[in-house]
Image (spheres, rainbow, N blue to C red):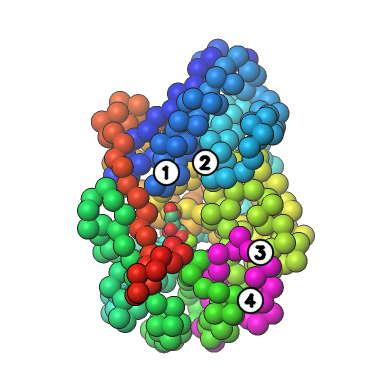
């Protein structure tokens, strides 16, 4: 069996997605997600200009060898653009292998370790009443766990709170930040949410890399009475050693890693058991092959999976995640933001979302097909993530 063609499709059914389609001489094809939010075309070019010529004529069954040759052969290792491109190839090859075997991908990864995949959804509000309404809406949708994000008094636009429009369409929105105001406000918000919704509902919060280790330690401690499922990305954890200080001071569980792209980003965090959940997406971590290895490394440290699943992971990347979630033993939870009808018209998917739980379906492969005509009706639209500034105008972490 040989790869005879590989094409990159960029489509924007409401937001941009980059998809790699690999075709073989047997007529079997596979899909991989290469979406890197705000930098989509860089990955499309990396694939088209540099990776596709290397794939033509090779054996699609040699997944590990292809991965290693793209990673080591480029000489320039790591980084989100490179790893998203490699991820797309990896997932497309797993899709092909599973289709040839006539099995859903999770069967090739060890088979089902559970009946279904537990998720969490997002609730956010500028004020407490708005936030409570959002939490109630998620509960009604069946979500068994909920991420809570809130406005901060004195700040106009804050991460994770809906209604932060870009002033110029096609250019980044600017958000405000004041760490002291946030640290004063957030524990009161969780106190109110617990008083309203009781002790049982698993609650999560994402600090989006904005705190120093000392600030994160204080926040973790102050949130302990509200029993969080996790505090996410409390610091910019490229400095892995910083987590030692956070860990020493709080028992609030910690989740980190959606911007990480190799095992090296996690080495200290995992081997010193400084975190509880690893957050990388299949799409940004080089695919199913390396993410499965990371979960296996994390397992003896009792660290569990929590694959990143916001709107900017395409249904292809999400499907790959759900297959992995089904198969690994140390599964924790899957983030799931859901998709619009327009996206579902472009990506026909076998995975289902019922009562707050995902199932990958039993279609051979990853179970997603791309409707290329529908995709072509939604061309790329330039878009950026927001930029975050302190009240004096200094750029802060986003
Ligand atoms: C999450 C993330 C997202 C990111 C987004 C960036 O936990 O889901 O923090 O909301 O901000 O994926 O592209
Ligand atoms: Mg996050």
Task: Write down the residue under mark 2.
Answer: 81
- Residue drawn at the location 53% of the way across and 26% of the way down: 50
Residue 251: x %, y % from top left:
64, 79
Q: CA distance from mark 4 to mark 2?
A: 30 Å
Mark nearer the N terminus (4 vs 1)? 1
Left or right: residue 243 compared with residue 334: right
Label 3 sits on a secondary structure element that is loop
Query: 14 above or below 10?
Result: below
Q: CA distance from mark 4 to mark 3?
A: 11 Å
Query: 148 or 194, which is in the foreground?
Result: 148
Residue 37 is inside the magenta segment: no
Residue 211: x %, y % from top left:
52, 73
Query: 233 or 300, which is in the foreground?
Result: 233
Task: Write down the residue under mark 3.
Answer: 240
Task: Write down the residue under mark 1.
Answer: 39
- Stretch of the chain drawn in magenta: 224-251
Residue 244 is inside the magenta segment: yes
Mark nearer the N terminus (4 vs 2)? 2
Label pair 4/1, CB-CB below 8 angstroms:
no
Label pair 4/3, CB-CB below 8 angstroms:
no
Q: CA distance from mark 4 to mark 1?
A: 32 Å
Label pair 2/1, CB-CB below 8 angstroms:
yes
């Amino acid at each position: 069996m040989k790869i005879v063609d590989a094409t990159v499709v960029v489509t924007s059914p409401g937001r941009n997605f980059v998809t790699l389609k690999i075709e073989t001489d047997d007529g079997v094809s596979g899909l991989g997600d290469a979406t890197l939010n705000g930098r989509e075309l860089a990955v499309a070019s990396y694939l088209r200009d540099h990776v596709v010529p290397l794939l033509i004529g090779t054996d699609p069954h040699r997944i590990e060898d292809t991965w290693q040759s793209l990673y080591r052969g480029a000489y320039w290792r790591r980084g989100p653009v490179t790893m998203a491109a490699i991820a797309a190839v990896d997932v497309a090859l797993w899709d092909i292998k599973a289709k040839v075997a006539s099995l859903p991908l999770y069967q090739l990864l060890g088979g089902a370790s559970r009946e279904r995949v537990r998720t969490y959804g997002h609730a956010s509000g500028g004020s407490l009443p708005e936030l409570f309404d959002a939490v109630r809406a998620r509960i009604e949708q069946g979500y068994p766990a909920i991420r809570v994000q809130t406005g901060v008094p004195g700040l106009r636009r804050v991460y994770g709170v809906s209604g932060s429009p870009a002033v110029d369409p096609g250019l980044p929105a600017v958000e405000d930040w004041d760490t002291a105001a946030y640290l004063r406000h957030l524990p009161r918000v969780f106190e109110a949410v617990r008083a309203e919704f009781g002790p049982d509902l698993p609650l999560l919060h994402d600090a989006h890399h904005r705190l120093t280790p000392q600030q994160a330690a204080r926040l973790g401690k102050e949130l302990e009475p509200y029993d969080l499922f996790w505090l996410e990305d409390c610091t910019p954890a490229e400095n892995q050693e910083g987590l030692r200080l956070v860990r020493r001071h709080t028992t609030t569980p910690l989740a980190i890693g959606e911007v990480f792209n190799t095992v090296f980003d996690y080495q200290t965090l995992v081997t010193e058991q400084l975190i509880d959940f690893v957050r990388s997406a299949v799409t940004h971590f080089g695919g199913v092959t390396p993410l499965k290895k990371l979960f296996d490394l994390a397992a003896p440290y009792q660290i569990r999976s929590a694959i990143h699943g916001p709107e900017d992971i395409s249904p292809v990347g999400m499907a790959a995640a759900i297959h992995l979630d089904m198969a690994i033993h140390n599964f924790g939870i899957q983030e799931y933001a859901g998709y619009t009808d327009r996206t579902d018209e472009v990506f026909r998917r076998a995975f289902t979302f019922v009562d707050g739980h995902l199932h990958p379906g039993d279609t051979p492969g990853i179970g997603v097909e791309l409707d290329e005509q529908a995709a072509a009706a939604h061309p790329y639209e330039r878009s950026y993530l927001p930029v975050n500034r302190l009240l004096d105008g200094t750029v802060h972490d986003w």
